[in-house]
Amino acid sequence: MVQDTFLAALRNSEAFKGEISEKNWLFLILKNKIIDHYKKKASKIVTSLHELEKDIEDFFDDSGHWKKEHGPQLWNSDTESATNTNDFRMILENCLNRLQELSRICFVMKYLDEKESDEICKELQITSSNYWVLIHRSKLKIRNCLEKNGMKNN
Amino acid sequence: MKFLIISCKEATFRLLKHEEFRLSLFALLQLWLHLAVCHWCRLFNKQNKKVNSLLKNIDTTVSLTEKEKELMQHKLKE
């Protein structure tokens, strides 16, 4: 973000009239950049929460039962031994990239950083019920994605 | 008897929560009954456990590879 600030300053250097010191001017730009950043983040979170329910509908029908095409399929029984951690890691990374930002952050914090759920909620400033919806959704998606990318019984 | 029935959506949700919290006895009973009749959720439960153990074994402290470092430097130059 600091780099962005300098770039923006360079681009707009004609607009700088010398009414305030250079230092203050740079800080002003930085401040605006930070505000923009968090505004963007916040609006993303709001929309993502709306999309949550819709996303879960991919897996379940109206009555909450698995849709046939998205239900769990049998996995190869020897995946346990065959999945060396490097392969699994590559697949997982791919799958994680397909998740929405907020779900991905929750998933990584809970399962990879092994943080406590309370802590995650606090850090991300989300309610625990929203948090669990996010975890639920990301787990469903990750499971589905892993299945499609190598865990399935051929 | 209807009060004993929960959906698959609810059952998978409870399975995940159960990793961390104690469910009430009644909630557990509903979940247990659901798993007894639903092979999909049983499968989900099994696979979820497998995924969890795989996730645990991942070493999260990796450094960047040389290629990634180069890429980063390249991007910085731009």
Image (cartoon, coloured by chain):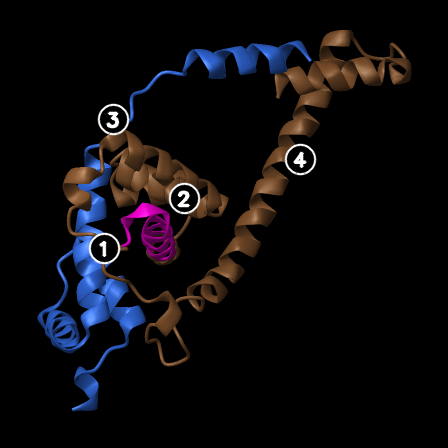
Tell me how far mark 2 sits from mark 3, CA to CA: 17 Å
According to the picture, the residue beneath numbered tag 3 turns out to be: B59
Is residue A101 shown left or right of residue A2? left
The residue positioned 35% from the left and 76% from the top of the image is A64
- Mark nearest the camera among 4 and 1 is 1
Q: Which residues are magenta?
A: A137-152
Q: Colour of chain A?
A: brown
- Specify the amino acid type for callout 4: Asp
Secondary structure at numbered mark 3: loop
Secondary structure state at the residue bearing disc 2: helix
Badge 1 is on which residue? Answer: A75
Q: Is residue A144 above or below residue A83?
A: below
Q: Marks 1/3: CA distance?
A: 24 Å
* Residue density around tag 3, few if under 14, some if 14–19, many if 20 or more, within 10 Å: few
Q: Does the CB distance between marks 4 and 1 fall below 8 Å?
A: no
Q: Nearer the viewer, residue A133 or A78?
A: A78
Q: Amino acid at mark 3?
A: Asp
Do the residues bearing badges 4 and 3 touch, measured as CB atoms within 8 Å?
A: no
Name the residue located 67 percent from the left edge and 21 percent from the top edge: A30
| Residue B5 location, quadrant | bottom left
What separation in Å lies between label 2 and label 4 (alpha carbons)? 29 Å
Q: How many marks?
A: 4
